[in-house]
Amino acid sequence: MNLESFVWEEKDILLEYKSIDITKIDKKNILGVPIDDLTREESMAKILDFLENRKKVRFVLFLDPIKLMRIRPGQKYQKFSESDLIIAEGKGLQWASKKLNQNLKERISLISFLMDLFRLAHKSKYTIYLLGSKQENIEKVYKNLTRNLPGIQIIGRQSGYFSNEWEKKIKLSLKKCSPDIVLVGMGFPKQEKWIRDNLDIFSYETKNPKEKKYSIVIGVDNAFDILAGKRNIPEFFQINGLQWLWRLLTKPYRIDFWWYFVKFYFMVLWNSFKKN
């Protein structure tokens, strides 16, 4: 799916999202990792709540089986499991939730989520900063967004490939722009590590010295490439949340990916056996 083929729906999305009771959203535990149990509409309701009640920087993490295995308790990236919103994207997590009697409501596609987010930002005039991918891809995403949603406020866009000197300029740009939403597409775990290593650039001074403004920061992996039409992932794998499986099949030399996949599969089966 890309931006050019997407149909922008006309509906009162603000009313729809504000009518959702987000206090009833629960978390499900899959192999020690808490995952928010929500629908696509509820995910947007949570984002809207973050935007309207910004008391700190908010992190949103999209999860698939391989990522889950890398942020489990005791793993190197365990701290990423403390994100403010963890969304199940990979279909393997839906399978695991059923096996473990957790039953997640829905698997949420990152691309579908972003389409909803762009509509929400356009409707409410929230500002967006794009960081990641190659510059040509970012420019194409920007061009498609501004054509399909005239007036959308993309106030910054930078490639994810930068030198140390250029990184300083990006940080200054973020501080100056103070965007409401920052989308970082550098791939896991690089994007999450970069976000947390630079936490201070996502909080901004306001006219009131006692108040600060904070961004919502979302790791979007290779979404910019897909939206620009540059990532040739078959539609079947995109629709079914199997991008992680496509990576396995196209990069068989990544032994670590295969190890995480096999370990995930057998750990779910073993824990399911113990429960039942």
Image (cartoon, rainbow, N blue to C red):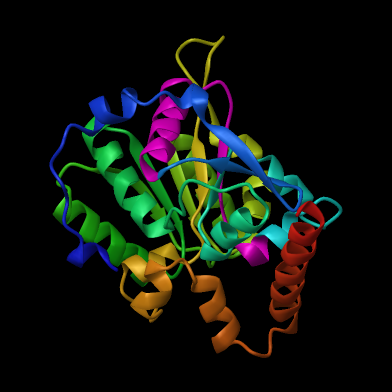
Residue sitting at the far right: 74
Can residue 152 be seen in this snapshot? yes
Q: Nearer the viewer, residue 40 or 60?
A: 40
- Who is closer to the viewer here, 40 or 131? 40
Residue 84 in view, yes or no: no
Identified at 61% across, 54% down, the residue is 97
The answer to if 185 sits in the magenta stretch is no
**137 sits to left or right of 86:** left
Q: Which residues, given as a range, are shown in magenta?
A: 40-67
Return the residue nearer the eye: 203 or 185.
185
* Numbered disc total: 0
Residue 231 against residue 41 in the figure, above or below: below
Give the quarter of the figure containing the C terminus: bottom right
Question: Image check: 110 left or right of 14?
Answer: right
Asked where in the image residue 260 lies, by quadrant, the reply is bottom right
Q: Position of residue 72 (x, y in %)?
A: 77, 54
